[in-house]
Image (cartoon, rainbow, N blue to C red):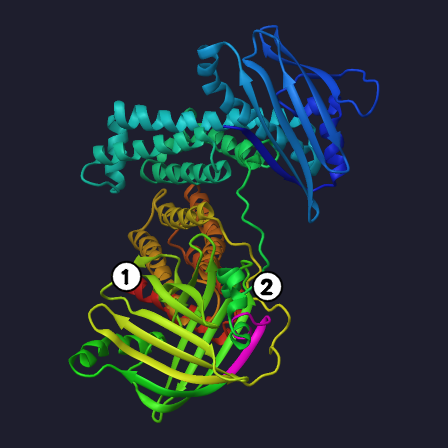
Amino acid sequence: MKLTAETHIKSDRDTVWRLSQTPQLHARWDLRFTDIEYLPRESASEPQRFRYATRIGFGLAVKGWGETIGDPERATSALRFGSTDAKSIIREGTGSWTYSDQAGTVRFSTVYDYAIRHGWFGRVLDLLFRPLMIWATRWSFDRLRIWIEDGVQPETSFRLWLLKVVARYALALTWIYEGLIPKILIQRADEIALVQNAGLFWRTPSHTLAALGFAEIGFGLWLLLGRFEKVAAILSTIGIISLATLVTSVRPAVLADPLGGISKNLGLLACGLIVWGLSDLSPLASRAKPRRRREVRDKGRSPFAEALREDLHLAAPLVQAHLTPELGVHRYQGTMKSVWRIEGLRRWLSAPFLWVGSWMHTLFPETGDGISFQIMNRFFIGTDGIARMTFERKFHFPDVERSFEATMLYDEKADVILDALGHRRHLLVELVPTIENGAITLRSRRQWLTPFGLPIRFPLPRFLAGEATIQEWQESETSLGIRVTISNRMFGAFFGYEGTFERIDGVAESVRQPVTASTGDRPLSGMARVAVVLVALIGTAAYGASFLVGTISHGAWLWSTRVALASGISWPVFGLALLGARRAGGAWEWFDICLRTMALGIAVLSLASVANLAVAATALNRASTAFVAAHLALLLAADVSMAVYFARKALRLGMPLSMSIGLWVGVLNGAFALFLVLS
């Protein structure tokens, strides 16, 4: 296993070269070296020899030698190194550094390897030493990046990293101790009574306490590992506040205990704040882990050009022009000679599939001869940088108009075209293109159900799948021919159509590079989505629990419970309605909008929780008109601020303002009010 590291630094190449090729500066940021000393050389054409030393503690140091050849113009540096020191398991090694400019940043990377000494004993030690060296290399690369980008000196960033690690470990060990000792191994009577009085337990209070303990241990182990430490610090802070709120609501006397859990939690909150605040200013090895880079492709190439590659030139000229158009919208019109269905019993058995297809805008039950139709193709680059082609066919039958809609993109991993079928993209099909006698033939392969276009795939059994064969050829100098046949293992070929069409627009009806509608926001990562959902759930629960602190009327307690339940139920209802109403944008884009909107509402709602805790510490009456009015005002402020934010983001994705406001008021607020009354 070779040792690798890679970082992207917002700087110029000369700066990165100087800080990595100057011995005194190099030793400041590279954790693997304490001292580096260049040796004299007779000419610049000779390799630069050097000596290095690494202190390992207890007054000991490992010494070694090396030689390097660097070329600033070619932005490469080759290295050969080794050691005769018996304390080092490295006998000799080679490596290289590369510096490449990439749109205002420098990609600084290294690859190296070494041979070991001490025989089998050295090989055993290397099982631990090599991962440690990989970590130290990547940690050092990120340390250099922070030095250049943020101006944090390497010595300072090391101290900040040490402070952050100590705070994270203290936080992790506290969670593990709190989960293991008082909740699993030695369950105290007051802890069990606390769970029982809260009324929030499953089976028995003892079982619930143990389950909570295992959850706290798991959370502590997450903090120990250091993965996504900022998210862990945020969730730790929310968890501490939520548990403290729950405890004080059931046993308010803990507020007066100077050595109780509340005082301890202040220190833990400080640790969480340190981890969160120092995460970006202290080195992290995972940031310098090399990322897999896909082969660079021309983003202006259509899915068919990507899939066919050199075979594309075998297609007839008009077929090539249709499948590899310019970016923009292109229109065609023609006549279907025949739209047919199978006869006999199988005609009736296949009818339900065609009726479902008409709802999905993929198939239809109508038949006829001489049916006029139009095709609109749109070739565009999505916000994710992937080229897509849409095919929209409209068939004009005597009594009804039917539609076929599909969006195609190239799947590099499977080397096929993925065809998302229908207006809502409920069906995903693999298409394999081939060129035969100048004509293109597309044959379907695997198929999945993808509800509402979500990136969730449910394999469709072969006996339910419709196997498609699409053929397109050049009919004349100006027209194209098309033949589509849909078959099934049970019914055979049960539906199809054949006709000719030609282009009716001379040029693309759009700008050179149109893109799909976008909110302008970066997509949330998977961990960020999970974190926001947890924040929303915990924030809503904290709002309800804040009413339980101190003395409170039965009506206020019922109010808090109803608000929490209605909020939790109305959002999923709103999300489903939104998926059905959207006209543009991916499902994950709308999901991210909802998450960001919820986060804004929770931020406003947290003021109400703070107000409850503040009032609980005073003699104010929480049944007073002023208290109720303040809560209603905060809820209204949360709703209005979320509605404004959502409407602005929805407008950027092409949803009319009237529709977004109607969905917000009619579905979300309506469902909230309904569940509030019913609960």
Of all residues shown, which one is farthest toward the front?
A: 437
The answer to whether one can see residue 400 in this image is yes
Of all residues shown, which one is farthest toward the left?
A: 345
Residue 335 lies left or right of residue 293; in this view the side is: left
Q: Badge 1, how many Cα within 10 Å: few under 14, some, many 20+?
A: some
Q: Which residue lies under the disc numbered 1?
A: 460
Question: Looking at the image, is 453 positioned above or below residue 397?
Answer: above
475 vs 297, nearest the viewer: 475
Tally of numbered tags? 2
Q: Compute the Cα span from label 1 to label 2.
A: 32 Å
- Assess whether residue 322 is covered by the magenta stretch: yes
Q: Which residue lies under the disc numbered 2?
A: 300
Coordinates of residue 456 in the picture (x, y in percent): 36, 57
Residue 277 lies left or right of residue 486; in this view the side is: right
**Secondary element at image label 2:** loop
| Residue at 32%, 79% in the rendered image | 496
Coordinates of residue 473 in the picture (x, y in percent): 46, 77
Question: Looking at the image, is 542 positioned above or below residue 220?
Answer: below
Question: Looking at the image, is 189 positioned above or below residue 516?
Answer: above
For the C terminus, which image quadrant? Answer: bottom left
| Residue at 36%, 48% in the rendered image | 541
Q: Amino acid at mark 1?
A: Leu
Q: Which residues fall within the magenta stretch? A: 321-332
